Amino acid sequence: MAFDKLYDYRERLERSIRRIKGMPNASYALRFLEHLTSLGLSAARISKYAALLPVILRLFEGKDLAKVTREDVERAVAWINQQPYAESTNQDVKHILKKLIQYVKCGSCTDGTPIPPESV
């Protein structure tokens, strides 16, 4: 049985997208997910990113992601580090945050894209 059917990643992704749509900076997050799809990431990976994006978006409520500073990102990372997440989840959230900021600031998050100074 294919993992897509077993875990229903597409349905999970759709649920996460519905949740994201009502949040501040939703347009950045949704374009980021489209970008990940264009890069050929699996449905499972994109589903995981989408599930964790609301956590990240809440950290920047009231701020335009295109205008966040290094200090804003450092505060977000400090908050993430204080959460009772499993170490793998903690690393995933910080990785997604880094890729999201890279996408918003540079228009891409591929390996060759420079890391903006705001990323930690």
Image (cartoon, rainbow, N blue to C red):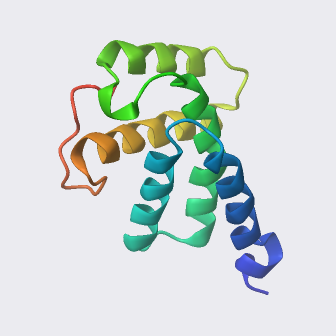
Please state which of residues 51 and 5 is positioned toward the viewer in this rendering. 51
Q: Residue at x 38, y 44 (%)?
A: 99
Which residue is outermost to the bottom?
1
The residue at the point 32 percent across, 34 percent down is 66
Q: Position of residue 18 (x, y in %)?
A: 70, 55
Position of residue 54 in the picture relative to residue 102 (left or right): right
Is residue 98 or residue 104 the one in the foreground?
104
Residue 96: image location, x then y, percent: 48, 42
Q: Nearer the viewer, residue 46 or 16?
A: 16
- Quadrant the C terminus occupies: top left
- At horizontal 65% and vertical 56% (from top left) the residue drawn is 17
**Residue 108 placement, left or right of 51:** left
Nearer to the camera, 102 or 88 = 102
Q: Position of residue 29 (x, y in %)?
A: 49, 48
Asked where in the image residue 1 lies, by quadrant, the reply is: bottom right
- Left or right? Give the position of 90 relative to 96: right
* Location of residue 95 with respect to 50 vertically, above or below: above
* Residue 101, horizontal then vertical, whole percent: 36, 38
The answer to which quarter of the image holds residue 70 is top left
Q: Is residue 106 above or below residue 34?
A: above
Above or below, 25 against 63 in this view is below
Residue at (56% x, 61% y) in the render: 46
**In this view of the protein, can residue 93 be seen by the observer?**
yes
In this rendering, the count of numbered labels is 0
Quick check: can you spot residue 90? no
